């Protein structure tokens, strides 16, 4: 099956599966996904939008839902997380559309959540922006590398771009 020619039903099914995977991964990793270094390994899934741009909105919604169920920091974290998810997954999709190296997905997965989420978390938690951003960058760097590895593995598995 050519993964670029998915039907609407297949895209919907894949979107639901990816959303479920994101939320389940967040559930099982929440003990270190909301800490000082916030290793949110679920955000590695944003990279999949590199291969499947239709996943941008489902991935943004996944972050929104995860923050609603597990976050506890209110509407800014819920809505902000959804917007950060859209921006990050959208950036990964743009890299794929431009046919740039899948390894570049590590950059948006690392930078956008860490620098973006710090905007409101620094206010909510009373921590200086750059101190919080530096802390979040450490955790997101792990997710960025895992995301890039995931995209490269999936690209080879589905023999996309050949």
Image: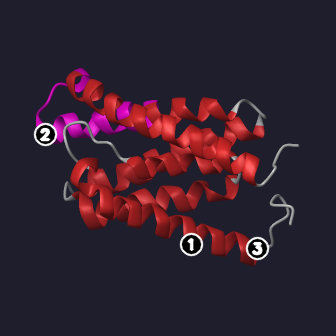
Residue at numbered disc 3: 8
The single residue placed furthest to the top in the displayed view is 130
Is 68 placed above or below 108 here?
below
Mark 1 touches mark 2? (CB < 8 Å): no
Q: Is residue 21 left or right of residue 30?
A: right
Q: CA distance from mark 1 to mark 2?
A: 33 Å
Residue at numbered disc 1: 16
The mark closer to the camera, 1 or 2, is 1
Q: Residue at x 53, y 29 (%)?
A: 107
Label 3: how many residues lie within 10 Å, few (<14), some (14-19) or many (20+)? Answer: few
* Quadrant location of the C terminus in the rendered image: top right
Of 37 and 76, the residue lying toward us: 37
The mark closer to the camera, 3 or 1, is 1
Residue 16 coordinates in the image, percent (x, y): 56, 72
Q: CA distance from mark 3 to mark 2?
A: 42 Å
The single residue placed furthest to the bottom in the displayed view is 9
Helix, strand or loop at mark 3: helix
- 129 inside magenta stretch: yes
Label 2: how many residues lie within 10 Å, few (<14), some (14-19) or many (20+)? Answer: few
Helix, strand or loop at mark 1: helix
* Quadrant location of the N terminus in the rendered image: bottom right
Task: Indicate which disc, 3 or 2, sits on the residue closer to the N terminus.
Answer: 3
In the rendering, which numbered label is found on residue 125? 2
Q: Is residue 87 left or right of residue 65?
A: right
């Amino acid at each position: 099956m050519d993964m670029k020619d998915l039907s609407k039903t297949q895209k919907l099914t894949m979107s639901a599966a990816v959303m479920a995977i994101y939320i389940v991964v967040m559930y099982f990793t929440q003990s270190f996904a909301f800490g000082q270094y916030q290793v949110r390994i679920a955000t590695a899934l944003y990279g999949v939008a590199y291969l499947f741009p239709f996943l941008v909105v489902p991935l943004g919604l996944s972050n929104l839902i995860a923050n609603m169920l597990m976050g506890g920091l209110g509407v800014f974290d819920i809505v902000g997380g959804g917007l950060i998810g859209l921006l990050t997954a959208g950036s990964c999709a743009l890299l794929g559309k431009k046919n740039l190296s899948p390894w570049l997905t590590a950059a948006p997965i690392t930078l956008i959540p860490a620098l973006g989420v710090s905007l409101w978390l620094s206010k909510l938690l009373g921590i200086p922006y750059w101190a919080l951003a530096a802390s979040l960058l450490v955790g997101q760097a792990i997710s960025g590398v895992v995301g890039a590895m995931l995209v490269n593995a999936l690209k080879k598995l589905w023999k996309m771009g050949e």
